[in-house]
Image: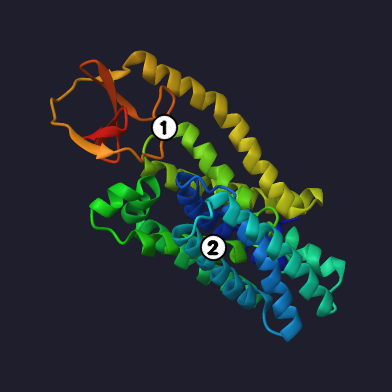
Amino acid sequence: MSILQYDFMVRALLAALFTGLAAPAVGTYLVQRRLALMGDGIGHIAVTGVGLGLLTGQSPVLTAVIVTVLGATLIEVVRERGRTSGDVALALLFYGGIAGGVLVIGLAGGSAQTLQSYLFGSITTVSVTDVWTVIALAAGVVFLALGLAPQLFAVCQDEDYAKVAGLPVRFYNLLTSVLAAVTVTVAMRTVGLLLVSALMVVPVATAQQLTKGFKATILAAMGLGALASLGGVVTSFYVDVAPGATIVLLALAGFAAAWPVGSLLRHRRHAGAPFEVDPGLPHLSVPEDHRHTHGVDCGHVAVRHGDHVDYVHDGHRHAHHGDHYDEH
């Protein structure tokens, strides 16, 4: 019995493929910003968008896109201009989004089964219109995530460095949040709003175990996300289990398999050649606001520099010195 002889499974496989590519592409930047749970927060507020769609008779996907983009933009503005930290801003998304969504869906006359199909995914029921919507949105997300990779990575890794380099940090932060919001709505019919964050984060964590460098990580994460998504749909068809949960469990199994391999590779790399030769570059004292904590297992090349160690990443070197770090 071939899975491709069923039209609904062909649609499910297409939706899974594009979702699996788009989610880790955006998730890579969220992990760099230490906002790995942002997908969960946006997923909760997307419930409100789905409820508004059901209440007004519009497409739930369309209203979810609009609501999540507005919500993600608002949270980013609050985080940047106010004194609300990232985790508190995400908490606002969690609680307000899910509460408002459940209330609106109830007013729209939606049943618990309707809500569950969006919370946990219902990929085998996607229509042709849904598939084309997923493909269009996912393609746009991947295009921007890869096309603007140098700028987005610089902003996510070190905002101060990006500002010095002349990048519009506020714009790229907002763009990352908007891409995350669109990705959540793309994935809500595939893995569900409550599980979408796993597809955005787990393939990235798996890729980080095996790769060196940002470009290799994002491409590997996209490949792993696509494999997990397709594998989950195929497995659910033959075993008759929930597709969304199967996709996430396959992604987690990939991480479990990659973790010991990654640990071995890091140990060998540091044991074999932990230090490079210092080329004698001059120091530039920069105020300390470096988000990444360097260390033996951070994945960056260590360079012995006199009585301390510099760590190389993103084309430059950092070394902590009291209230500042040296920039080469």
- The three-letter amino acid code for the residue at tag 2 is Ile
Q: Image quadrant of residue 152?
A: bottom left
Q: Are marks 1 and 2 in contact (CB under 8 Å)?
A: no
Which quadrant: the C terminus?
A: top left
Which quadrant: the N terminus?
A: bottom right
Residue named by callout 2: 75
Of 9 and 250, nearer the camera is 250
Identify which residue is drawn at 66% across, 65% down: 45
Q: Is residue 298 left or right of residue 71?
A: left
Report how far apart the C-alphas of labels 1 and 2 lie in the structure. Answer: 26 Å
Residue 293 has which mark? 1
List x then y, in percent, for residue 276: 24, 21
Question: Under tag 2, what secondary structure?
Answer: helix
Badge 1 or badge 2: first in the primary sequence: 2
List x then y, in percent, for residue 133: 57, 73
Identify which residue is drawn at 85% across, 66% down: 113
Residue 133 has which mark? none
- The three-letter amino acid code for the residue at tag 1 is Thr
Please determine whether, in this image, residue 291 is positioned above or below residue 119.
above
Q: Is residue 94 visible?
A: yes
Please determine whether, in this image, residue 124 is positioned above or below residue 215.
below
Identify which residue is drawn at 80% across, 51% down: 241
Of 272 and 41, nearer the camera is 41
Please determine whether, in this image, residue 105 is positioned above or below residue 116.
below
List x then y, in percent, for residue 89: 58, 56
